[in-house]
Image (cartoon, helix red, strand yellow):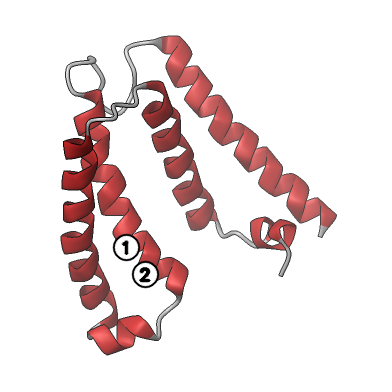
Amino acid sequence: MTLIGYFAGLTDGMIILWCFLIWYLYFVFKYFDPAYDIWLRSFGIAIFVGFALNINSFGTIAATLSADPYQVFRFFLIPFCVSSFPALLKGKGLFIFSVSFKENITAIGLCMAFIGFVKVCRVII
C-alpha cells in the first residue's frame, strides 16, 4: 500500500486521531521544554498505561503480540501525549485551547489542511 493509499483509506475515527496528533505536535513544538523529567515521566506513564490498555483490549499479552502493530503503538502513544501535554503547558494559561486566538486558528487550520489532504488522496485513488 502506498502512503497516498493509506491516507485515502483512513476512517473518520482515524482522521480524528491524526488531528489530535497534529494538535498535540503543534503545541509541543510551540512550547517545547527540553527538561528530561517531563519526557521521562511521560514515557513511564505511557509504558504503564499502554500495557494496561493493550491487555484490556486484547485480553492477554500473547494476543497483543499478534495484534495490529499500529493499534498497539497507539495505546502507548496516546498516554504519552496525554501526560506530556499538561506538563509542557503548565503555567502558560492553556488547557486544551490556547488563550491566543491566533494559535487556535493555526492548529485548527493544520487539522483542516490534513483533512483536505485526505480528501485529495481519496480523489487520486
Residue that mark 1 sits on: 75
114 relative position to 28: left or right:
right
In this rendering, the count of numbered labels is 2
Residue 100 to residue 77: above or below: above
For label 2, the SS is helix
Q: Which of 40 and 49 is in front in this view?
A: 40
How far apart are labels 1 and 2 at the CA level? 5 Å
Classify the position of the C terminus by image quarter. Answer: bottom right
Residue drawn 32% across the image and 12% down it? 99
Amino acid type at mark 2: Val
Query: At 35% across and 83% down in the image, what residue appears?
Result: 65
Q: Do the residues labelled 1 and 2 touch (CB within 8 Å)?
A: yes
| Residue 50 circle label | none
| Rendering quarter of residue 67 | bottom left
Direction from residue 80 to residue 112 in the image, left or right:
right
Q: Nearer the viewer, residue 25 or 41?
A: 41
Look at mark 2 in the image and give the residue it sits on. 72
- Disc 1 residue type (three-letter): Phe
Mark 1 closeness class: few <14, some 14–19, many ≥20 residues within 10 Å: many
Q: In this view, does 99 lie to the left or right of 107?
A: left
What is the x, y in percent for residue 62? 28, 89
Looking at the image, residue 93 lies above or below residue 16: above
Question: How many neighbours does mark 2 have within 10 angstroms: few (below 14), some (14-19), or many (20 or more)?
Answer: many
Residue 29, placed above or below residue 24: above
Q: Position of residue 39 (x, y in %)?
A: 24, 41
The residue drawn where x is 30% and y is 44% is 81
Disc 1 secondary structure class:
helix
Residue drawn at 23 percent across, 56 percent down: 46
Q: Position of residue 40 (x, y in %)?
A: 20, 46
Which of the 4 image quarters holds residue 88? top left
Residue 93 at what x, y percent from top left?
A: 22, 15
